[in-house]
Image: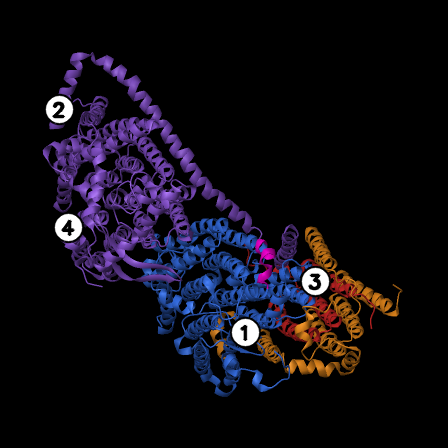
Chain colours: A blue, B red, C purple, D orange
């Protein structure tokens, strides 16, 4: 920190190696179609997969090393790395699933007129870069840019299915609300800048004191919370979610519901935990109210929903509400103990990451199955609960796996969802958030209803007269790989969580 | 140096930001909505530069510069989305894009 | 860790789950006969393992004295200083439960082969049934609350799947949903309790032994503290959901939409007893919260009474049995509530036998009646279905509490315990009186059922054409009938067993695991489990000083043995009289005209009537009976039904409707117009800023 | 405080900016609205000059008023083909207008209030040594240290250099990220601007695209 003279030594390239690799991958996947013509269809996703793999390995190599780069603006500590693993795996899964329909020789009847353009891969990789930087950033302006890097490709991906009016509408809605929320985020950042004079989390941490009357700072952090809240779909910044998830191609919805939420929460935990934690006494009320609202509204709106994608969208809103508990726990824990670099993450962060990991696989698995089942003559956006009626009789495996994901989302034992909730709620309770936990549990009870509605339809109702599902869901190995990965992860986390918890136990706040 | 109080500038920024926010809600033409968002971002820039000037940190200008870049990127994508959606329609009405609700 | 034969118990869970896997994945491709063998075989194997466990447990020198043995499987959750192992707890309580569950399940599996012989989905049915047994075994064998919760949710899920098994019926779907929602409310209670224990510093882990051990210490200083009461009440909320007690009983009668073997297995014999089991399992925890115990007793007693009044007027054979189940479960909770945990388990066991038998008998009747369940259409089935009749009669006698049948012993113990509870706690006498009246009503509605179904003349053509069920169904009935008769002899009352020089084996066996812990009289660390520290040693297979333990435990049991014998006899007499009155009443009310052809029992009743005619004029009896018992009974039944349908159902449906309504209202904000979404964001932003400011100013 | 030229200038430009911003919302024609926005941007550029942000002032004119707004005008013209109805005529529900205005006024009040409550209202000069406390100290060591008279004059001269220097040193990572952002935006615009494939031949249309 002492010398601001720029020299290459101040950049730790190992720390940013994953994003360098992925950025290179973006260029390659962008240019390759011009060189490889028709073969690009298979080469392009292959490159994307290799790039993701390389990024994964380069992240794994710096595990436990706590590398920071750019004067600590970018910190590749274990929390970042764990989040990066989630992002990369999600992207990996999505690329494989897309490829299954994208490749001419693997193509099944595609209802969503999907992904005819090879640009989908560079765009997805850009999202991953944005997500990784979001989770690593310890400077608000970098966080802001990372959020934009993540969002802008997503606006496009949401509208990727150009033959669908709904997809384009989703894109427009996402974009307009997203840009509006970005405005608030940027304004909040400027107010914080005005109050503190710097945007590094450490500088903010040092500058803010709960006793000063620095209302500009408070206004700033409230507006920043709005911006973050939009990204992870907290109520009342959630309204875009159902429309966008419904209109976007199902896999992109899954991608958004998993990766964006994970990235958003990692960034929130960082900012609230490492930046403004001394002000916990000032922001916790607002966060607690938002948490309660988010879970309740999400679940209530899902209750009578019949369109599958919208139902999952509302459910993802509710999950954001539960996750917000982790922010409160971290705030409370760290405002009492004080943050020290290198300290173990503590329960809350561990719970949050465990919950995220469990949630991510369940939700992306669910969307993958919806996408898989989408019939050729119907838009996935319109798939209703009635359409999966009697699914068990026709495709027992699909039904079983879908049911498993729904159980995980609902929080039934032996799935990841149960333990996620268990850890999170138990931790919240031990930190004294009794009322909120009771509220969350009531919500969890309520939510079982709509997840079960789907399971009832699949298992206990006879199939509709004329099948409105994809009659022969493509029996291709790629999709099996995707869904089975999610299944195994869901069960693995639910039955043998020790392995992941062990990993998380060693996760610490970056130095 | 200047003797205009910082408060004037920051209030101007807040005012422009609020006007932009109103515009987003009351306009039905997506292009105008988008223009209102640009106005909001301009207000943010003004805010950054004001603080940069009065707190004497040059960084505010760097932030403003980065923000302009972001705005430019948003414009590129945003206008493309608007064109893609309304190309086939006679009316450019954002309220018409409501196939999905409830 | 040394390997012990008791570790085999893990296999008991594995077998049924393996069965599920095989039947679920390949069942549809397998011949019917293969399915019919695999499904019962897996459960049978589990039962055999149960027997081995019992034998080893009783003979293993390291375990003499009722020390629990924990069979470690793997570490499930490890987070910080919190560890939850996936391990199984083997002690008298879990062995008893395991034997009941696997034994009854096995019989019902065999019966189901016949019952489901013509169903096209029988493979799926057996897959669910096996899954249920696996989950139930996890529930009763789990060594900790979280692991038990896996089974808890698992049985709920299976119950739900099996209720809705005949998915063509819309009512089955609704019933399934209702069962599920109510169960979730109960689960909410269990979860809250679990989290409270987890968050409390006084409870180091969620292992049952540790909870009870910690409760023992905690109770010293915090006897009946609000925290403990709250935990117990939340646990009890979970129990009311699973075991169909007021106010969460409403799902059980509706659950009768499922196939009858399912009703027998899940909604009578096993799953619904999970709540009772949980209370017994956490006996020390409950013992240090007398207030919560009182609530348990009152709710149990009220449920027993209330459900019995409804059962008086039901006409669907399965619904009568369903309400009867609710009522009997109420008895079990009453027993737990007054501190006689082992008696609750005893009644659980005898109830499992006779109620499973009743349901299977009812299934046989329904089968014979070509799926008609209305008792008004039956009558005279005794001749056409003799095996069913006789076995059903045994069960009815057992549930009515006729001496020498199993139900008599267990119910008598409950009544006696309640009486002694009332002796210490004066207003508790009301509980005893209500329990006695309920015993009367039980006998009454059971014999109403027997008479209208089996005796008299066939009312309809269907009843005339009724036929006995195949042997694969009747043999299980006979086995259960034997059990329903002899089941009570494992625990004779002290007044009987004492003079015979014959101790009460079940009590001896269960007492260490499920007794009331009296904090004021006994020092810390005594009795069961000694303390959690020593249970570690137990895992190591090291013998601990079990002798003292069982001595102390038995010592506590002496209390009841020391109750004055004459009063005990009066109590037994009272319960016999009330049961007899009930049967007699049923006969009077539903008396037959065609005496000549009646089987033995009716002749017996008829003789009673002669006595009656001899003393009083018939019309007078009729009138008296009409106005003192029947009319008030009808009114009571009516009131109960109204309460049931309007208030309880209304509250549940109303709550559901309320949420649905609110959900729909909120959804209207989702107008699809993006500008309004922006308005929402602006509103949110303004609110957040203001809330933050207000928080700051209030600070 | 005597009214100086600066305040007058500020008043004039700020006033024009606000009036133009409001006009942007109220004029009928989108073209006019766009022109109003260009006006606001130019006023802001002037204010940037007054704030000694010379580099950004130029960027504002070139990028915003020049490039971005031209793009806007292109798109507006695109929709203004003869025969297309005038989107500006569409009415907006009164409650929306009222709600938006009320909320915006509250937002403005709250944020302005926060400035007042924070107590740096009258800040006109650089902070005195007393004010230069916590915030300043860590930064004082860095190259963008608080300005003395002469460094401030230097900065006025070398503003672009200094901004550029920071962009390429300390803020290199954000800067590089914006390049990725722009790349993605470009790709995205290209993807979206493509003609949508005919509905019935979705897959065939896809094949032709690469």
> Do callouts 3 and 1 mark residues in contact (Cβ within 8 Å)?
no
Q: Residues within 10 Å of mark 3 (few under 14, many from 20)?
A: many
**Mark number displayed over residue C604:** 2
**Mark number displayed over residue B11:** none
> Do callouts 3 and 2 mark residues in contact (Cβ within 8 Å)?
no
Q: Nearer the viewer, mark 3 or mark 2?
A: 2
Magenta stretch encompasses residue A279: yes
- Tell me the magenta residue range: A276-285
**Mark number displayed over residue A133:** 1
Q: Give the overall secondary structure of the magenta segment.
A: helix
In the image, C258: left or right of A421? left
**Residues at discs 2 and 1 both on one chain:** no
Q: Chain of mark 3?
A: D
**Where is residue C649 shown, x and y percent of the image?**
40, 37
Between the residue at mark 3 and the residue at mark 2, the CA separation in whole angstroms equals 94 Å
**Where is residue D31 shown, x and y percent of the image?**
75, 68
Quick one: SS at disc 2?
helix
**Residues at discs 3 and 2 both on one chain:** no
Can you identify the residue that label 4 sits on? Answer: C58
**Where is residue D24 shown, x and y percent of the image?**
76, 64
**Where is residue C643 shown, x and y percent of the image?**
39, 31
Between the residue at mark 3 and the residue at mark 4, the CA separation in whole angstroms equals 88 Å
Between the residue at mark 3 and the residue at mark 1, the CA separation in whole angstroms equals 40 Å
Q: Nearer the viewer, residue A248 or C307?
A: C307
Can you identify the residue that label 3 sits on? Answer: D87
Q: Nearer the viewer, mark 2 or mark 1?
A: 1
Q: Is residue D79 above or below residue C574?
A: below
């Amino acid at each position: 920190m002492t010398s601001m003279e720029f020299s290459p030594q101040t950049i730790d390239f190992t720390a940013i190696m994953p994003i360098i690799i992925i950025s290179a991958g973006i260029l390659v996947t962008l240019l390759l179609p011009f060189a490889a013509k028709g073969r690009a269809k298979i080469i392009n996703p292959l490159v994307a997969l290799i790039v993701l793999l390389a990024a994964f390995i380069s992240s794994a190599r710096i595990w436990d090393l706590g590398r920071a780069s750019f004067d600590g603006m970018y910190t590749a500590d274990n929390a970042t790395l764990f989040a990066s693993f989630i992002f990369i795996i999600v992207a990996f899964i999505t690329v494989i699933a897309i490829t299954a329909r994208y490749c001419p020789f693997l193509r099944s009847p595609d209802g969503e007129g999907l992904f005819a353009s090879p640009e989908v891969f560079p765009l997805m990789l850009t999202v991953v870069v944005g997500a990784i930087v979001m989770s690593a950033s310890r400077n608000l302006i970098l966080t802001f840019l990372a959020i934009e890097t993540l969002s802008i490709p997503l606006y496009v991906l949401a509208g990727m299915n150009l033959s669908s009016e709904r997809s384009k509408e989703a894109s427009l809605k996402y974009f307009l609300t997203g840009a509006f929320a970005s405005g608030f985020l940027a304004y909040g950042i400027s107010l914080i800048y005005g109050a503190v004079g710097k945007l590094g989390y450490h500088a903010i941490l040092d500058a803010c004191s709960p006793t000063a009357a620095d209302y500009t700072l408070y206004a700033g952090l409230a507006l920043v919370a709005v911006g973050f809240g939009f990204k992870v779909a907290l109520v009342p910044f959630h309204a875009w979610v159902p429309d966008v998830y419904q209109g976007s191609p199902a896999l992109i919805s899954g991608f958004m519901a998993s990766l964006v939420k994970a990235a958003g929460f990692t960034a929130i935990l960082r900012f609230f935990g490492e930046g403004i934690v001394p002000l916990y006494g000032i922001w916790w009320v607002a966060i607690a109210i938002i948490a309660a609202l988010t879970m309740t509204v999400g679940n209530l709106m899902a209750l009578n929903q019949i369109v599958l994608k919208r139902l999952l969208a509302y459910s993802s809103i509710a999950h954001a509400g539960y996750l917000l508990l982790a922010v409160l726990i971290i705030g409370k824990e760290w405002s009492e103990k004080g943050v020290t670099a290198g300290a173990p993450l503590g329960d809350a962060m561990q719970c949050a990451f465990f919950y995220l990991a469990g949630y991510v696989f369940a939700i992306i698995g669910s969307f993958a199955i919806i996408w898989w089942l989408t019939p050729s003559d119907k838009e996935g956006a319109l798939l209703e609960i009635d359409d999966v009626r009697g699914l068990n009789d026709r495709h027992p495996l699909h039904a079983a796996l879908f049911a498993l994901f729904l159980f995980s989302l609902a929080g039934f034992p032996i799935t990841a969802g149960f333990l996620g909730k268990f850890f999170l709620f138990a931790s919240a309770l031990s930190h004294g958030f009794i009322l909120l936990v009771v509220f969350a549990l009531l919500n969890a009870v309520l939510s079982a209803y709509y997840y079960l509605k789907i399971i009832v339809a699949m298992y206990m109702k006879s199939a509709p007269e004329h099948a409105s599902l994809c009659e022969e869901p493509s029996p291709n190995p790629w999709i099996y790989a995707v869904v089975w990965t999610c299944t195994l992860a869901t069960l693995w986390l639910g039955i043998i969580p020790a392995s992941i918890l062990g990993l998380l136990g060693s996760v610490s706040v970056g130095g | 140096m200047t003797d205009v109080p910082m408060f004037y500038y920051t209030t101007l920024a807040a005012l422009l930001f609020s006007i932009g926010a109103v515009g987003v809600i009351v306009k039905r033409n997506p292009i105008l909505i988008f223009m209102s968002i640009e106005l909001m971002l301009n207000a943010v820039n003004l805010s950054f530069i004001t603080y940069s000037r009065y707190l004497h940190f040059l960084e505010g200008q760097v932030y403003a510069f980065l923000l302009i870049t972001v705005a430019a990127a948003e414009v590129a994508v945003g206008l493309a989305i608007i064109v893609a959606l309304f190309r086939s329609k006679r009316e450019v009405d954002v309220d018409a894009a409501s196939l999905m609700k409830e | 860790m040394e390997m012990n034969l008791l570790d085999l118990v893990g296999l008991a869970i594995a077998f049924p789950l393996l069965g599920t896997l095989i039947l679920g994945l390949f069942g549809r491709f397998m011949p019917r006969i293969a399915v019919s063998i695999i499904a019962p075989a897996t459960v049978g194997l589990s039962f055999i393992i149960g027997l081995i466990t019992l034998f080893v447990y009783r003979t293993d020198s390291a375990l003499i004295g009722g020390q629990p043995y924990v069979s470690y499987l793997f570490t499930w959750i490890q987070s910080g200083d919190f560890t939850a192992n996936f391990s199984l707890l083997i002690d008298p309580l879990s062995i008893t439960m395991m034997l009941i569950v696997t034994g009854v399940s096995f019989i019902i599996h065999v019966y189901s082969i016949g019952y489901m012989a013509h169903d096209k989905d029988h493979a799926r049915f057996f897959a669910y049934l096996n899954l249920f047994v696996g989950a139930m075994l996890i529930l009763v064998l789990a060594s900790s609350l979280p692991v038990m919760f896996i089974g808890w949710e698992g049985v709920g899920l299976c119950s739900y799947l099996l209720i809705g098994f005949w998915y063509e019926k819309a009512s089955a779907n609704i019933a399934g949903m209702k069962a599920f929602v109510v169960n979730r409310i109960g689960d909410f209670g269990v979860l809250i309790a679990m989290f409270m224990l987890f968050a409390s510093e006084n409870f180091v882990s969620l292992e049952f032994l540790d909870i009870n051990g910690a409760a023992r210490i905690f109770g010293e200083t915090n006897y009946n503290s609000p925290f403990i009461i709250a935990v117990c009440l939340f646990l009890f909320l979970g129990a009311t959901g699973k075991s169909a007690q007021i106010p969460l009983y409403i799902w059980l009668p509706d659950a009768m939409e499922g196939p009858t073997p399912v009703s027998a297995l899940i909604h009578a014999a096993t799953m619904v007893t999970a709540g009772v089991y949980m209370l017994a399992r956490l006996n020390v925890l409950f013992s240090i919260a007398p207030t919560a115990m009182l609530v348990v007793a009152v709710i149990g007693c009220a449920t027993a009474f209330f459900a019995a009044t409804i059962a008086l007027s039901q006409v669907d054979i399965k619904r009568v049995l369903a309400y009867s189940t609710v009522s009997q479960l109420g008895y079990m909770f009453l027993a737990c509530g007054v501190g006689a945990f082992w008696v609750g388990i005893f009644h659980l066991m005898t109830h499992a036998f006779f109620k499973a038998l009743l349901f299977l008998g009812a299934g046989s009747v329904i089968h014979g009646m070509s799926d008609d369940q209305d008792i008004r259409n039956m009558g005279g089935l005794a001749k056409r279905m003799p095996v069913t009749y006789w076995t059903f009669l045994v069960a009815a006698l057992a549930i009515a509490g006729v001496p020498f049948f199993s139900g008599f012993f267990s119910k008598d113990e409950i009544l006696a315990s309640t009486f002694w509870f009332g002796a210490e706690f004066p207003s508790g006498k009301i509980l005893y009186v209500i329990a006695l009246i309920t015993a009367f009503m039980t006998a009454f509605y059971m014999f109403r059922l027997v008479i209208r179904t089996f005796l008299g003349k066939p009312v309809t053509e269907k009843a005339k054409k009724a036929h006995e069920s195949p042997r694969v169904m009747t043999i299980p009935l006979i086995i259960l009938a034997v059990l329903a008769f002899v089941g009570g002899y494992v625990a004779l009352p002290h007044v009987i067993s004492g003079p015979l020089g014959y101790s009460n084996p079940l009590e001896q066996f269960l007492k260490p695991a499920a007794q009331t812990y009296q904090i004021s009289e006994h020092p810390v660390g005594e009795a069961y489990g000694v303390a959690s520290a020593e249970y570690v040693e137990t895992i190591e297979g090291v013998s601990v000083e079990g002798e003292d333990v069982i001595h102390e435990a038995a010592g506590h049991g002496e209390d009841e043995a020391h109750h004055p014998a004459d009063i005990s006899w009066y109590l037994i007499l009272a319960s016999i009289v009330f049961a007899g009155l009930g049967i007699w009443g049923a006969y009077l009310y539903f008396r037959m005209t065609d005496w000549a052809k009646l089987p033995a029992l009716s002749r017996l009743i008829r003789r009673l009537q002669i006595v009656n005619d001899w003393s009083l004029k018939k019309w007078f009896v009729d009138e008296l009976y009409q106005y003192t018992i029947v009319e008030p009974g009808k009114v009571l039944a009516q009131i109960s039904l109204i309460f049931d349908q309007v208030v309880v159902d209304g509250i549940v449906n109303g709550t559901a409707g309320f949420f649905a309504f609110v959900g729909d209202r909120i959804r209207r904000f989702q107008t699809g117009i993006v500008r309004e979404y922006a308005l929402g964001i602006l509103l949110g932003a303004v609110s957040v800023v203001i809330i933050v400011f207000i928080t700051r100013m209030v600070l | 405080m005597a009214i100086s030229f600066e305040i007058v200038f500020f008043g004039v430009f700020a006033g024009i900016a606000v009036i133009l911003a409001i006009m942007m919302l109220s004029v009928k024609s989108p073209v006019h609205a766009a022109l109003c926005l260009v006006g606001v941007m130019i006023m802001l550029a002037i204010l940037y000059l007054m704030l000694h942000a010379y580099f950004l002032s130029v960027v504002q004119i070139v990028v915003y008023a020049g490039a971005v707004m031209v793009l806007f005008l292109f798109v507006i013209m695109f929709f203004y083909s003869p025969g297309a109805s005038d989107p500006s005529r569409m009415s907006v529900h009164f409650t929306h207008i009222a709600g938006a205005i009320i909320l915006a006024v509250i937002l403005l009040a709250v944020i302005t209030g926060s400035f007042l409550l924070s107590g740096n209202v009258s800040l006109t000069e650089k902070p005195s040594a007393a004010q230069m406390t916590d915030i300043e100290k860590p930064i004082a060591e860095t190259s963008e240290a608080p300005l003395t008279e002469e460094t401030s004059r230097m900065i006025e001269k070398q503003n672009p250099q200094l901004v550029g220097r920071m962009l390429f040193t300390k803020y290199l990572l954000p800067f590089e990220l914006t390049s990725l952002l722009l790349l993605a935006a470009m790709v995205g615009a290209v993807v979206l601007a493509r003609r949508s494939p005919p509905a019935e031949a979705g897959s065939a249309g896809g094949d032709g695209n690469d």
